[in-house]
Amino acid sequence: MPKTVGVAVSHAAFHFDKLYTYAVMPDQQDQVRLGSMVLVPFGRSSRPRMGVVLACDAEPESARLKALFDVAPASACLTGELLELVRLLKERTFCTWYEAVRAVIPYGAQYKPALAADGVTPVLQKQLTRHTETLYRLAAPLPAKPRPTAKQMAAVALLSGGPRTQADLEAHGVSRAVAENLCAKGVLAAERVNKSIDLYAHIPPRTERLELTAEQQAAFDALAPHLEAGRPHAALLYGVTGSGKTLVFLKLIERCLALGKKALVLVPEISLTPQMIRRLKERFGRRVAVQHSALNHTERLLQWQMIQDGGADIVVGTRSAVFAPLEGLGLIVIDEEQEHTYRSESSPRYAAQEVARWRAAKNGALLLLASATPSTETFYEAQAGRCQLVRLTQRYAGQPLPAVQMVDMRAELAAGNPREISLALEDALRANLAEGRQAILLLNRRGYQTMAQCGDCREVLKCPRCSVPMVYHKDGGGRLLCHYCGAQIAPRPEVCPACGGKLQYRGFGTQKAEEELAALFPEARILRMDQDTTAAKDAHEKLLAGFARHEYDIMVGTQMVAKGLDFEDVTLVGVLGIDSLLFAQGFRAYETVFSLVTQVVGRSGRASAPGRAIIQTTDPDNPVLRLAAAQDYDAFFAQEIEYRKLGLYPPFCSLCIVSFAGKKEEETAAAAARFAALLAQQAARQPDIPLRVLGPTPGSILKINEIYRYKLTVKCRNDKRFRALLGQVLGLYEQEKLPAKASVAVDMHADGDI
């Protein structure tokens, strides 16, 4: 039994984030183990702090050790694999121990300090009350005498098929009193179990066999043996849009479950979860659990407990689902693997692909990355033979790729069309509506107009707290809104605050597109999908389901409409306002544009009717747009990999962004410069560690919510030696008390655009 434990405490700064030794009281020794959540006295004032046990020792090293205040129940203990994930996050992302703990378990399963009933003793309290329910099972035959009632016989008949909850029995007309009476007779046994929740019970099952095309079957045959081998294996399923990658996933999951193993499916954003959940629920029913941020804390906790208790064989969710406590993983699928949303932008700054690769190695599982537009790094790995490459070159059911037309918006303006919807797109939409077909329009800017500029002094009206233009939103009576800090100005101003000149509103967002479409096609039913219309709970699912039922004719939206959606009647896609992304900062700008255009064009013509797409741009000869229009990923990759090699960008190096944030610009810039100097000093002692340091420079947006941002870009090799070097520099930075002037964050997965 442990006499002392090493505890990682919450709210620790980087340089004192170590294990602190505490004594274990005799009455706690049976409860304490590795991974236990504990409450400890910390610091001179012995204030209660949350902690997690990461080491157990037999004998106290000092008689003056402080003792644990409280220990959480064994059911709240982190499993061995979750503990190892905590260590991985700490080592790879430069977070603190407790930040890593908070990442791997949901809010509802965490604890907080509280006081006992005496008002003095510090104790642990669950963030959420644990939800339990009564489960009944047959324990003995129903005796013939006294003669059983009809309700008793009904209860026994129901339970002969397996255990049932109290709610189940009551739904079949068996009251709690009848069940308790049978328990008293010894016929039934009752136990309290974690409540489970079937969030998508309304989805009907589908029993027909999955029919694969010859090409899909060949892909399945190439991948399936790695489910049985019991050795870790990585593969890229690279298929053109509409080639039916999801059917291959479903077949692999089916085989995985038949082998007694479990599967994890990741999708990049919430808008894609409803369709993936539906496909999985139709096939696999109640054994599917869901983990994503649109669930409330209680729903997420109940789903997590269901996974932890072994009640789920398949977990589907967004980035954080990679930490689901599944045991016996056989398959991890990362759909649309190139998406930036798989990278966390707050501590711990992890990439879901890296965590998934580690879990696949730990479990001897198949890691399947899938995309029509793989990231340049992943495709390079596949080309180099470090990852199996499986291709799907044909659209499902033999459909051709959409015909793509480029429209030069400069020519539209010269011809007297001032609107943002070209004459070609207007004609195509009109013909599409006449045929009873649907259309999707991509415009990656929400709001009505994207800036207000003074006609006299030419100043652009910026957010008072951020160095970005305010965006005009027409809803709610009209207001200017900052998309970074949420600041609002209402009603919208008409004169320039700097010189009193008249403000001119220009630019084009999803709200204005919706209005322009309504004016052009008053008979059309238009659905707008952006952050403003999908903020409510389950909004994505409800709106997309309405579009699938043909309640809308045209869907206009931001990036959330571009990927993964599958609607049989969509035969026209329009791409508006793509030029701003072409000239964005960050080395992934072209990759992002190519992926977005390829993906959204691929939403068209996925069933029997052929599809078409119209791309509006002021640069119709741009090679990236041309290659995306042709859906020619191989040619794009050949061009992109040369650019990456020439500029020394991933995959030819790792990119580490060290960002600084402070309330005063001069202090933030000085702190960033001092960090660069400390890094140069430490690196000079180990000249064989390859690295290039660029900056410090201001962030791409200098100020957000009154906080100034600077960054240091380090081109490096992401290995143990480099991470140890960076750890030393972070420690020195904190010892010089520089975090008081500017907080520091390290991101090994950033795009260079912060």
Image (tube, grey):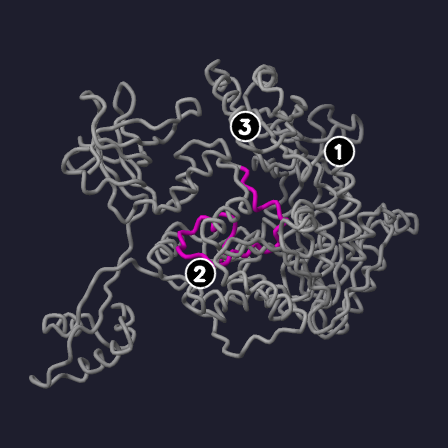
Residue 293 can be seen in this image? no
Percent coordinates x, y for residue 51 in the rendering: 32, 34
Residue 615 can be seen in this image? yes
Label 3 belongs to which residue? 721
Label 1 belongs to which residue? 647
Circle 1 Cα neighbour tier, 10 Å, few/some/many (<14 / 14–19 / ≥20):
few
Q: Nearer the viewer, mark 3 or mark 1?
A: 3
Name the foreground residue: 105 vs 155. 105
Residue type of the residue flagged with mark 1:
Gly
Label 2 belongs to which residue? 262
Percent coordinates x, y for residue 63 in the rendering: 18, 21
Percent coordinates x, y for residue 496 in the rendering: 72, 29
The structure residue drawn at horizontal position 33% and vertical position 35%, both measured from the top left corner, is: 54
Disc 1 from disc 2: Cα separation: 42 Å
Q: Is residue 346 left or right of residue 20?
A: right
Residue type of the residue flagged with mark 3:
Arg
Residue furthest left in the image: 146
Circle 2 Cα neighbour tier, 10 Å, few/some/many (<14 / 14–19 / ≥20):
many
Q: Quadrant of residue 58?
A: top left
Above or below: residue 554 compared with residue 59: below
Q: Bounds of the magenta span?
A: 316-345
Q: Are marks 3 and 2 in contact (CB under 8 Å)?
A: no
Q: Quadrant of the C terminus?
A: top right
Q: Quadrant of the N terminus?
A: top left
